[in-house]
Amino acid sequence: MRIYLDHNSTTPLRNEAKQAMIDAMTVVGNPSSVHLEGRVAKALIENARMKIAEAIGAVGADIIFTSGATESAALALIGRDIVCSRIEHEAVTSWCDVELLVNRYGLVEVKKPSQSALQIANSETGIIQTDVAGLWLSDMTQAFGKVPLAFNWHDCHCAMISAHKIGGPKGVGALIVKRGTELAAQIKGGGQEMGRRSGTENVLGIVGFGAAAEAAEKDLVSGEWEKISQFRMILENMIEEFSDVPILIGRDSDRLPNTTCLVTPGWKGETQVMQMDLEGIAVSAGSACSSGKVRSSDVLKAIGLSENDASCAIRISLGLDTTEEDVERFAKTWIKKYENNLKRKNYI
């Protein structure tokens, strides 16, 4: 039986989201239509909008539905002079001047928050940033649902989130906007989403997003992620007890409860991913959006790793369905592969 340990890439669809989407499939109306069928569809969207606002602490803000966090970043950043650091997702660095400095602990120094974009937590290392109020854009994509946070706490102008990181469907996300913040629409047409993102809304995706957000909030409050943090500790302890060669990035930093970034100098991350995959375990060599590209991690180089060492990283990201047996099997399998490679090539 395969073990999936790549939840920072995407999460399995929650039963709550799946059932909500199935129920919504019978709704035939266009949300922009004024007749009963249209009003029913519109009500589903507004109900989901309310659930997401409550789950992320954004009551009173505008929730603009998009196709995902990448589109949300573009809507917030295009045409603006915003700075960021090298550890941001490419959806952000593509639109910003990459100027902000990162220290060896993975923390970013922000001097002018209102002209800056900064993530809450990094998808590759799990490292959580210290709170910076007043940002232009806060990337909450990885942190949402895993750690306590609220849009209104951070006093940022915009924040981006994505459904498939919290057990919702792929292809739908949101930009959260402080009321009164001016944004220029990039997709123009019928004026949906308060005139900021035209096009007939993805009703099924939005409904699933709302249901996933509601369920994610309940899991966070009930302490489910504290259990996952204990499983991660078991995994990391097994690796550290075996060898002092691998580097656990952010070991002493505040991190997401589910994320381990493991660097083994001399053993390429892509090779590790393939070997684990053949053993029935899914992990990644970094962000899913860039791991298919043959290059070392910009995130790890930004915090001081060499080009070679940065290319020898894998990310293990646990989920709510991960068990203690899963992490133990991963650790034992990884150790076995490490020993086999050591004997065969003697390069570690």
Image: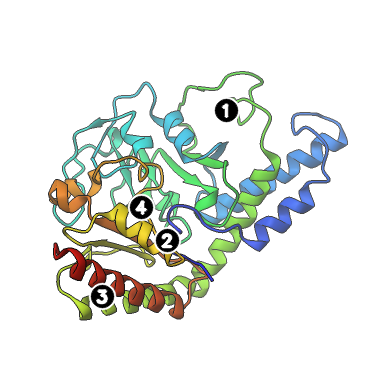
* Classed neighbour count for the residue bearing mark 1: other residues with Cα under 10 Å, few (<14), some (14–19), many (≥20): many
Q: Amino acid at mark 2?
A: Asp
Circle 2/circle 3 CB separation < 8 Å: no
Q: Nearer the viewer, mark 3 or mark 4?
A: 3
Visual colour scheme? rainbow
Q: CA distance from mark 1 to mark 2?
A: 39 Å
Can the viewer see residue 63 in this picture?
A: yes
Q: CA distance from mark 1 to mark 3?
A: 47 Å
Q: Amino acid at mark 1?
A: Arg
* Classed neighbour count for the residue bearing mark 3: other residues with Cα under 10 Å, few (<14), some (14–19), many (≥20): many
Q: Which residue is mark 4?
A: 123
**Residue most toward the front?**
344
Q: Which residue is mark 1?
A: 197
* Precedes in sequence: disc 1 or disc 4: 4
* Precedes in sequence: disc 3 or disc 4: 4
Which residue shows up at 49% across the image and 73% down it?
A: 224
SS category of the residue bearing label 1: loop
Q: CA distance from mark 4 to mark 2?
A: 20 Å
- Disc number placed over residue 239 in the picture, else none: 3
Q: Nearer the viewer, mark 1 or mark 3?
A: 3
Q: CA distance from mark 3 to mark 4?
A: 21 Å
Position of 132 with respect to 153 (left or right) is left
Which residue shows up at 75% across the image and 43% down it?
A: 43
Position of 18 with respect to 72 (left or right) is right
Position of 66 with respect to 325 (left or right) is right
Q: Nearer the viewer, mark 4 or mark 2?
A: 2
